[in-house]
Amino acid sequence: MKGALRCGKPLLGDVLVIVVGLIFVAFLFKTLWHNEQAAKLQIRLGDKIYATYSLDQNRNIDIQGPIGITRIVIADGKARFESSPCPNQYCVHQGWLSHKGQAAICLPNQVSLELLGGEKPFDSLNY
Amino acid sequence: MRFLVLIFALFLSACGKAPLVQTKSYVFGTLVDISIDGETEEKAHEVTSQILQDFQRLHHQYHAWQSDSELSKLNQSFGAGKTPMEISPELSQMLTQAQTLSKQSQGLFNPSIGGLISTWGFQRDEFTPVEINDAAIQKLVLANPQMSDIVIKGNAVFSTNPAVKLDLGGYAKGYALDLALTQLQKQGVKNALINIGGNIIALGQHGDKPWRVGIQHPRQPKPMATIDLLSGWAIGTSGDYQRYFEQGGNRYCHIIDPRNGYPAQGTQAVTVLLPPSPQAGVLSDVTSKPIFLSVPDHRANTAKTMGVEHYLVIDGNGYVTLSASMNQRVRWLAKPAKITVQ
Amino acid sequence: MPNSTKNSRIEIHTSPDDHRIAKLAALAIGLHLIEAVLPSPMPGVKPGIANIITLFVLYRFDFATAAWVSLLRVFASSLLLANFLSPTFALSLAGALLSLATLFFAQYLPRRYFSAITLSVLAAFAHLVGQLLVVRFWLIPHAGIAYLIPVFMTAALVFGVVNGLLTNYLLRISPAKFDEDKG
């Protein structure tokens, strides 16, 4: 290996490419590893935590609540209420949750979703 | 040896203190979120369940449409005639306070329009579109129920106007916050955050930083700003995105204008921030409504009349208008298209 | 079907270069197979030593030959490993195609300043990008891979440099032009 290093000496252009490569990789770490990405979905049913799922795996979750079955879908690193037995469908209209701290709730069926992942930007939500 | 025991005891006590105990529960017909910091888990749970029990009691006692609540019985009495009814000292106190606030808001805050609220279908657990009966609405508006129609003598109350039907929806959550704060202080809790359906009051801090509250975006499932809620401060928001139904391309929210009997249009949300006081909670609940119902030109005035220094309005287009002092406190996460400071 | 009236057998003439290329291709396939069975520190991260052959061929012969060797390696390896037309094959092919495309342009970089190290690094990145595209648009189209990209890119950079150094070394110790039939 030492021999190779000596004989395969990097040229000026090589060094340039390596340096640019390092900067590029550092940039990738900075942007793709920022903690804005939510990692986990926490589902609550009533007062208790029903389950916590990683957002990396696509799945469907059916939850039996007081008024029926609510379906939650995790796909593409996001989560949302797919269907719920509530009359107003506010929860479904909330759409996809993708960043930490985002939450949606189906009040009638007492199901709530929250995206966890790193430090929350606030302690509680005013609405 | 004693030194070691002391260290050991300190160590144990430090282990006993839970960093943060957060409980979420469905009470008051909405999501209640109580965070207690710096107490043992045991004590935190004890205090929390006590507060939740208090909330349950308030919820049932002052329920606007369950016929066996104290409030409903009072409403029935109002409708029947002018015979006074004996009520609890607590309700008497609440009504007196509500009367003062209603007068202060020049009738924009009017918890006696239960009839109108019911007509629009908002006295139910679910909100579905209702057939808009303009005749019935006009009739109720003409009947002109006002808080001033209520006569309170000690704990005996009657109304001079049978159309008065109390609905404490825009008041009770705030009252509950003040009650909870008093309870916490009585129990010796130093740091807590209570959120009843979005209305929040703070006590102490979160560790070594103030409690931080997110302000919901009226149209997207994420917060649009955060604000530090210092000890004793309360925050409340009236929005057209919490309780509403859509019909014929219009959104009808639960904030009804007593002057014309129709839900307010053209505003998405109003957020108010109140400094520490015995009624910080009540004010955080009540004062957002008159501002919500005011026309844009009058909003600053209304806020002033209600004693609100920190307010933020999001109009129908998503444009933001806020007071200078509020502007200093708000930390934007998603800057709105247009911000006006007044 | 041969239709020859003149000869009764088909003659394929091979040159010494053809032999050399065939041997190098075989070597590339061999290296690829060895790498396939060796455990890797993390799934998806491989040193890619077969690429040294590709680069070597590029320098000693020409791009067309290098492309030949590279693609031959991809197809032959997958047949031998019994994953022809599988996702693994798709990844391998996508990586090879994109890195070849990059080499097509990179080969014109002035040799005074850029050695095989540069080409190796660029080809390694391109190879990874090709594979990520297949993963993203066909195999696992969800956001989970975002976390892995920086890690893979680092590996590509590191192994690119190492392979480049090794290629430089091989180029230096092997004759500049193959005159005789050498193994």
Image: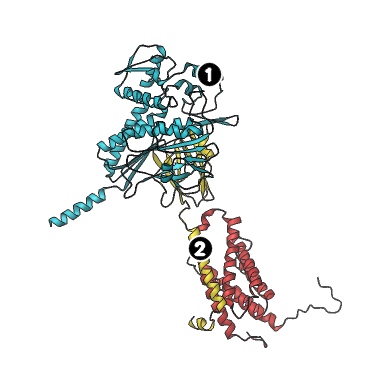
Chain colours: A yellow, B cyan, C red
- Look at the image and tell me whether residue C46 can be seen: no
Query: Can you identify the residue that label 2 sits on?
Result: A27
Which type of secondary structure does the marked residue at label 2 adopt? helix
Q: Which chain carries label 2?
A: A
Q: In this view, does B324 lie to the left or right of C57?
A: left
Nearest-to-viewer mark from 2 and 1: 1
Which type of secondary structure does the marked residue at label 1 adopt? helix
Q: Residues within 10 Å of mark 1 (few under 14, many from 20)?
A: some
Measured from the top left, where is residue A124 in percent x and y?
40, 43
User: Between C119 and C142, which is closer to the camera in this rendering?
Assistant: C119
User: Between B70 and C165, which is closer to the camera in this rendering?
Assistant: B70
Measured from the top left, where is residue B22 in percent x and y?
35, 43
Measured from the top left, where is residue B179 in percent x and y?
31, 32
Residue type of the residue flagged with mark 2: Phe
Residue B100 circle label: none
User: Between B172 and B151, which is closer to the camera in this rendering?
Assistant: B151
Q: In this view, does B141 lie to the left or right of C65?
A: left
Q: Quadrant of the N terminus of chain B?
A: bottom left
Query: Can you identify the residue that label 1 sits on?
Result: B138
Please identify the quarter of the rendering in which residue B147 is found: top left
Q: Height in image: A25 above or below B7?
A: below
> Given the current orientation, which residue lies at the most extreme right position?
C5
